[in-house]
Image: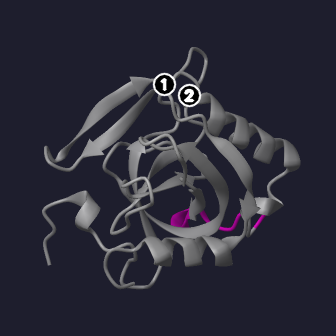
């Protein structure tokens, strides 16, 4: 079955693992977004001076979060890929985040933390197992990337893989 848009892909592979579409690869100093109506990636904004993506950043296709966009995902691995690459991943957890919505009210905008299946075993199975310093740096990264926007994000905590999977399932636009 062919899909006309990366957003229309099912959120899971045939073997049940989650897909993440890379928007901004590791090392990028600009936020790229997939523009579905154009079928291409565009620069959304530059990140603040000195900030770059520590890992591949993208979205889980076939989902729609409270902010109207697909569910955000950060894929932890050593390599960097390219915009449009679809990674088969396992969910490690999520960072609970709220942003200021367009109407001024706070809206949930969680970030899923994942790892690619091809990356082999990690030293941890859950995002909360990351060293405390790494979790603090990722939280600061999420705050820093939106510093010059009106989003005013707040980090509300970290949850494990079961909560991440339940969150993604709730945001899915097609059956998973």
Which mark, residue 52?
2
Element at badge 1?
loop
Q: Residue at x 45, y 40 (%)?
A: 25
* Circle 1 Cα neighbour tier, 10 Å, few/some/many (<14 / 14–19 / ≥20): some
* Circle 2 Cα neighbour tier, 10 Å, few/some/many (<14 / 14–19 / ≥20): many
Q: Residue 47 location in percent, x, y? A: 50, 23
Residue 121 shown in magenta: yes
Looking at the rendering, which quadrant does residue 21 occupy?
Answer: bottom left
Mark 1–mark 2 Cα distance, whole angstroms, equals 5 Å
Which is nearer the N-term, disc 1 or disc 2? 1
Which mark, residue 29?
1
Above/below status of 169 relative to 93: below
Q: Residue at x 38, y 67 (%)?
A: 63
Looking at the rendering, which quadrant does residue 86 occupy?
Answer: bottom left
Q: Residue 154 location in percent, x, y? A: 68, 43
Which mark, residue 16?
none
**Residue nearest the viewer, comparing 100 with 171:** 100
| Callouts 1 and 2 close, C-beta under 8 Å | yes
Residue range in magenta is 116-124
């Amino acid at each position: 079955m062919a899909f006309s848009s990366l957003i229309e892909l099912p959120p899971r592979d045939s073997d049940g693992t989650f897909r993440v579409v890379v928007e901004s690869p590791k090392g990028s100093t600009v936020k790229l977004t997939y523009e579905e109506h154009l079928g291409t990636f565009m620069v959304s904004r530059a990140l603040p001076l000195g900030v770059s993506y520590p890992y591949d950043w993208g979205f889980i296709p076939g989902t729609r979060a409270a902010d109207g966009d697909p569910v955000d995902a950060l894929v932890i691995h050593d390599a960097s890929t390219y915009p449009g690459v679809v990674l088969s991943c396992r969910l490690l957890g999520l960072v609970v985040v709220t942003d200021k919505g367009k109407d001024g009210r706070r809206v949930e905008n969680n970030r899923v933390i994942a790892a690619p299946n091809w990356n082999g075993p990690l030293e941890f199975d859950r995002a909360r197992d990351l060293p405390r310093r790494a979790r603090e740096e990722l939280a600061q990264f999420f705050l820093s990337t939106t510093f010059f926007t009106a989003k005013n994000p707040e980090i509300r905590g970290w949850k494990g893989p079961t909560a991440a999977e339940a969150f993604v399932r709730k945001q899915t636009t097609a059956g998973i």
